[in-house]
Image: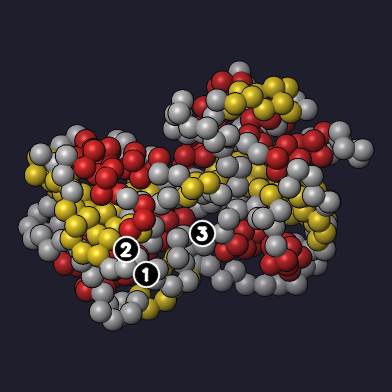
């Protein structure tokens, strides 16, 4: 937990799930800069927050929690970010209904008077969200973005300019910047290019030559990444009515390939990203029989999956949390897989060789086998005993 001093009071904030060992903060200088600007503490007038306030991309709820008295709408792609917002609102003593939580798949408010954008890592996600929000923005809307200087590029500003209107940036303060955009009453009409589809290459098993669908912000939305390609070449060859989970499913190519290889399998696609789960379902539906057994779930890893109910877990774990490199997500995924697997059930993992997942898997499962490797990646198999 860390204390965030804001113009609206001091807040004790945490990421989600809360881990006392985690030293990463639930806010940063970009959040602080934006809130001080809104309050008028940086030699400018305070922003009128009496209208409909929409906060986009609020990573752990720092912005929405600080502005809870103004009853903002938060739009987030992250299930974990939404859970963090709920927890931080409770911790701050705010009304739990003070913030309306929407996902990136939900319909946006019909009118937006103040639009606050925490610039995401994915430029595609920013593009998609600005397109979806643009019809609700009017000439009097106050539009302010925020991010660290390493997150704001010329291409970022060009998106605001092209979709909403004239855009400029502030000076950098503590390595953070603000983006100021003046909505154009007659913006140039531009089409939203998302979702995006592309054909998969040959030589990757059952999905060779088929089409994958990606909503904006999904990992490797423009092309198949080389790690997943390697994984697709070395998936388990099990047959029969097995329960299989594509954990951290992204666009769903791994789980869809498993379903094509074993039509009797029952698939569960899980990701904390709403955009990813939507992509996985679109990919699966386009490439399999529409009555094939599959469930698509936005959630916190394998929480909610019954213990001892799964035969195979397929996993390409992330090793970044926004700008931070961390193995905490992979470790939680491995522990969750151990809990939900039946005795004899298997966890298959692909990862960069240097991440040392074999060491972590041996600690969690007591065993680990190298299924395949190349100079960059390794496919590992651990068995629930």
Q: Badge 1, how many Cα within 10 Å: few under 14, some, many 20+?
A: few
Q: Is residue 254 left or right of residue 127?
A: left
With respect to residue 281, does 100 lie above or below? above
Label 3 – label 2 distance at C-alpha: 24 Å
Q: Report the mark closest to the observer, 1 or 2.
A: 2
Residue under label 2, please give it.
377
Q: Are marks 1 and 2 in contact (CB under 8 Å)?
A: yes
**Observer able to see residue 115:** no
For residue 40, what is the image quadrant? Answer: top right
Residue annotated with mark 3: 217
Q: Image point 63% across, 36% down: which residue?
A: 27
The colour scheme is secondary structure
> In terms of depth relative to the viewer, which is nearer, 222 or 269?
222
Residue 93 position within the rendered picture, expressed as x and y whole percent measured from the top left: 61, 18
Mark 3: give few (<14), some (14-19) or many (20+) Cα within 10 Å: many
Tell me, for residue 36, which label it has, or none. none
State the residue at coordinates (23%, 70%).
233
Read off the residue under disc 1.
226
In this view, the residue in front, 109 or 313, is 313
Whichever of callouts 3 and 1 sits on the residue coming sooner in the sequence is: 3
């Amino acid at each position: 937990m860390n204390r965030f001093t804001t113009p609206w009071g001091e807040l004790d904030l945490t990421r989600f799930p809360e881990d006392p060992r985690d030293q990463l903060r639930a806010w940063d200088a970009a959040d602080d800069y934006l809130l001080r600007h809104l309050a008028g503490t940086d030699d400018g007038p305070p922003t009128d927050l009496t209208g409909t306030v929409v906060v986009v991309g609020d990573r752990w709820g720092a912005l929405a929690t600080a502005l809870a008295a103004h009853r903002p709408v938060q739009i987030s792609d992250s299930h974990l970010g939404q859970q963090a917002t709920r927890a931080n609102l409770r911790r701050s003593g705010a009304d739990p209904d003070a913030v309306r939580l929407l996902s990136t798949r939900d319909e946006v408010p019909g009118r937006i008077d103040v639009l606050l954008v925490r610039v995401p890592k994915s430029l595609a996600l920013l593009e998609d969200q600005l397109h979806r929000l643009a019809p609700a923005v009017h000439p009097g809307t106050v539009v302010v973005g925020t991010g660290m200087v390493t997150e704001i590029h010329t291409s970022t500003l060009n998106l605001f300019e092209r979709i909403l209107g004239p855009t400029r940036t502030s000076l950098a303060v503590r390595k953070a910047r603000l983006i100021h955009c003046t909505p154009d009453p007659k913006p140039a009409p531009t089409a939203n290019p998302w979702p995006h589809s592309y054909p998969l290459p040959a030589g990757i098993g059952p999905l060779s030559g088929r089409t994958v669908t990606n909503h904006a912000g999904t990992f490797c939305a423009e092309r198949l990444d080389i790690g997943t390609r390697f994984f697709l070449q070395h998936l388990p060859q099990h047959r029969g009515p097995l329960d299989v989970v594509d954990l951290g499913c992204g666009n769903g190519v791994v789980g869809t390939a498993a379903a094509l290889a074993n039509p009797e399998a029952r698939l569960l696609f899980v990701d904390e990203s709403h955009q990813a789960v939507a992509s996985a379902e679109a990919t699966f539906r386009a490439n399999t029989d529409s009555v094939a057994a599959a469930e698509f779930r936005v959630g916190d890893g394998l929480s909610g999956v019954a213990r001892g109910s799964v035969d195979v877990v397929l996993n390409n774990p992330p090793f970044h949390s926004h700008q931070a490199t961390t193995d905490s997500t992979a470790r939680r995924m491995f522990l969750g897989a151990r809990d939900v697997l039946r005795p004899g059930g298997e966890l298959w993992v692909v990862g960069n060789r240097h991440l040392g997942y074999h060491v972590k898997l041996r600690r969690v499962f007591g065993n680990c086998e190298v299924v395949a490797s190349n100079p960059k990646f390794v496919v590992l198999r651990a068995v629930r005993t």
